[in-house]
Image (cartoon, rainbow, N blue to C red):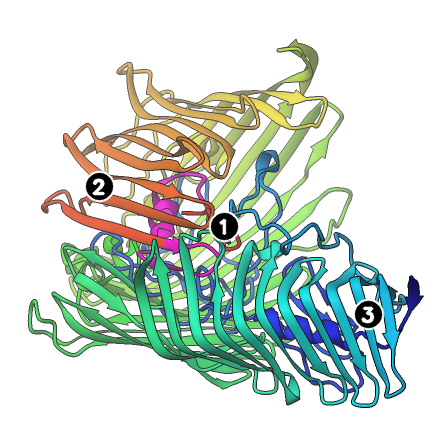
Amino acid sequence: MNTTKPGLSPITISILLACYPGLALQAAEAASPWDCRQEAGGKWVCAGAEPAMPAAMPAPAATPAPPGPSTPSATGAAPARERPAPAREPAPEPAARPSAGGRDEGAAAPAVARRTPPPLRPASTAVATADAGPGGRDPWALCAVSSAPGTFRPGSAASTSDLPIEVSADRVRSTQDGEDRLEGEVRLTQGDRHLQASQVTVWRAENRFEAEGGVRYSEPGFAVAAERARLRLDERTGELEQASYELPGLHASGRAERAELRSGDVVVLKEATYTTCDPGRPDWELSAGEVKLDPATGRGEARQVKVDFKDVPIFYWPYLSFPIDDKRHTGFLVPTFGTSEATGLDLSVPYYINLAPSYDATLTPRLMSRRGLQVQGEFRYLLEGQGGQVTAEVLPHDNEFGDHRELLSYQHQGVFAPGWSTDVDLNYVSDEQYFRDLGNGINLTSTTHLDRRADLRYDSTYWSVLGRAQSFQTVDETLGPDERPYDRMPQLLFRGALPEIAGTLRTSLRAEYTRFDHESLVTGQRVDLEPGLSLPLAGAAWFLTPSAKYRYTGYSLDDPDGVYPDSTTRALPVLSLDGGLFFERPLAWDGGDYTQTLEPRLYYLYVPNENQDDIPVFDSAALDFSFEQLFRDNRFSGRDRVGDANQLTLALTSRVLDNADGRERLRAGLGSVFYFSDREVGLETGAPAEDSGTSDLVGEVDYRLSDAWYARGGLQWNTDENDMRRGTLQFHYQPDNRRILNLAYRLRKDIDETLEQTDASLLWPLNPNWSVVGRWNYSIEDRRTLDAFAGFEYGSCCWALRLVARHYVNDLDEESNNALYLQLELKGLTRVGNSISNLLEHGILGYSVNPDDPTTW
């Protein structure tokens, strides 16, 4: 018998709320209980309500999203703290852009990487689904979850809430007192929502509903089975007995002896479990004596929480409170631990504080067996057009040295009016060994200077201006006073260009005022002006660009030693002519159709010689010679030196382009500079002139063998001595994110030292369960390993164990250090241990973290 009954829909909500811990229905009376759907990411959306984030009974999965200092990871000398992403991408500075082969023209010294605030995020992270990876592989690699017991399978398409409910049963009995009983194979269907039971009874007068005997319910992404289900439609209350649920989209399943739907959409689960393993015999399982979910408060409570791994209890907590929506909530985050020679055993327990919608804080006690108790704190704010964070770390008493040690930092970015923006980065540490002993990242142990900078800038269509105050804290104790960078107090930069004024004629203007300050060296003020004209001309197979600039620089100096005059100026023209030709031909290569180009290029540069020994060096440096350096108009960075030049560059480039997609498969370039006069200007006073007639021969090759293989090489060859001054060779293989192989060789010969290194790294699966990771960075010149690590991962479909050992040096003059990384991941629940991804990002080219992929190391 088939009939249609439109009034049975509340049973769906009862089952969903009672058996699906991640669902937090919003108590919106206007919303129909049928108007709820699950999105691809696992969120549920109900009519008239904002999306509610699924907060399953377990703790937040994988990496917690909360702000604040990351918990420790034995990254060499000290744990790592990941740096949050910027809240706003700053516009390019009007100062000179980074130059090929050298430093930024405005840079004084390397500084610690900047930390800028991200948007405020909730303190909880829902388990997310992921699309298939390369080759159709599921990047989650989690266990398959079947439908609820029996042959009744969940639907596969989105449901339609306004469809009628189709009811079928072997028998239907009605009584005069308002009782309807459906018996036999009872099935209720509305689109892709299905309910099956042996018997369904409806008491119309009491507005009560009961299903029993193999109760099964399913819809896309969710399936549940129970012995009995009861519901009072008017009170929106009910219960299920002996329920088991499956969430195929999350690869999760669980059970509850009893599930209650109370007034206010409060859900209470008795003796509930959760796992992402095979339901029959799970390797790990989270269980709780009672779980209470309250959508009105957005929080859940769990009592007698226990996690078993391989039938061994590994975690127990008598009471937990956790968020069940996408709002931020105050509470503890997932603790982490690590170990290193610098800190010993290292445990951090972050506590997140939700102060207001626009600002929050995180307080993290960090206990180190060798150092003592450190307290880390972070405060973040995000206002309209403004965002920033304040970070503090305090170690009142270092057990190793008996010192008080601390770190303070402040970052801010903002836009307060059209075109106007600010950027502030202030940093302080108590001592020069702070990062080495307690550092917040792998790279920070080699940091030499901390940046302290405040920028105010304005950008318009044709010009921009930047005001900057900048100083540095030197944290490398090997640097003497004279080796420390200058402070810029202040620096004003202007860069502008007019539209094309006559044909293709272009104008440009760069202007700068800087006051340089130093504790031991000459100080002073510098004004630099650089107006320019250029006339780009081009045809189908050629280009020609004549250019003229005028460089004026004036100084007002204060030299206590009397080496430099009180004031001096320099004025020089810079003339250049850049031209090239383009030839191409069809090329049949490796079974494909390609186009090969031949691109000869000439670049003539003339700058008259002017003695500059009376000008101090505030921010200039000699640039490394490279293929890109062949076409620069100054062999020095900064503004204090303008290299004299009467030279012609000859270069030849050839490219192979794939006609199918336009991609560049091969690019090779070779070039040299022919000098018509000696180069008199040097960086230091009294430097001898360079009298060679030609430069070193430089070349580069980039070759993409396939989508997975990439090779690159570079060469600087001294033709006078027939000797290689620079050399690089690199091979990179990466067919997907889980298979990476790198081989590299580097050679650099300078007057005072030689660097020669090899570097090999890999991330590789041996079979579906085992994978290995490793790196070996070796100095041939010093006959010493600089950095090496090796490890393995064993992973099943629902858990993974990762172990990595590292051997490294911070300084060639010091002894080697060792660190051990251990991480246990219960997929879909959490990770416990070290954050190994920080180490791999630094050590393996091509590795990147995918926060939605638990198979990521």
Number of residues whose C-alpha sits closer than 10 Å to that of mark 3, classed few (under 14), some (14–19) or many (20 or more) = many
In depth, the one of 706 and 719 nearer the eye is 706
Give coordinates of residue 315: x percent, y percent. 32, 67
Q: Amino acid at mark 2?
A: Gly
**Relative horizontal placement of residue 660, taking residue 624 as reference (left or right):** right
Give coordinates of residue 1: x percent, y percent. 91, 61
Residue at 46% x, 38% y: name it: 738
Residue that numbered label 1 is attached to: 278
Separation of disc 2 and disc 3 at Cα? Answer: 104 Å
Give coordinates of residue 453: x percent, y percent. 39, 69
Q: Is residue 47 visible?
A: no
Q: Is 133 above or below relative to 671?
A: below
Residue 834 is covered by the magenta coloring: yes
Q: Which residues are magenta?
A: 825-847
Residue at 86% x, 85% y: name it: 178
Residue that numbered label 3 is attached to: 182
Residue 432 is covered by the magenta coloring: no
Residue that numbered label 2 is attached to: 686
Residue at 52% x, 78% y: name it: 328
Which is closer to the viewer, label 3 or label 1? 3
Q: Is 500 above or below relative to 466?
A: above
Report which quarter residue 741 is drawn in: top left
Separation of disc 3 and disc 1 at Cα? Answer: 34 Å
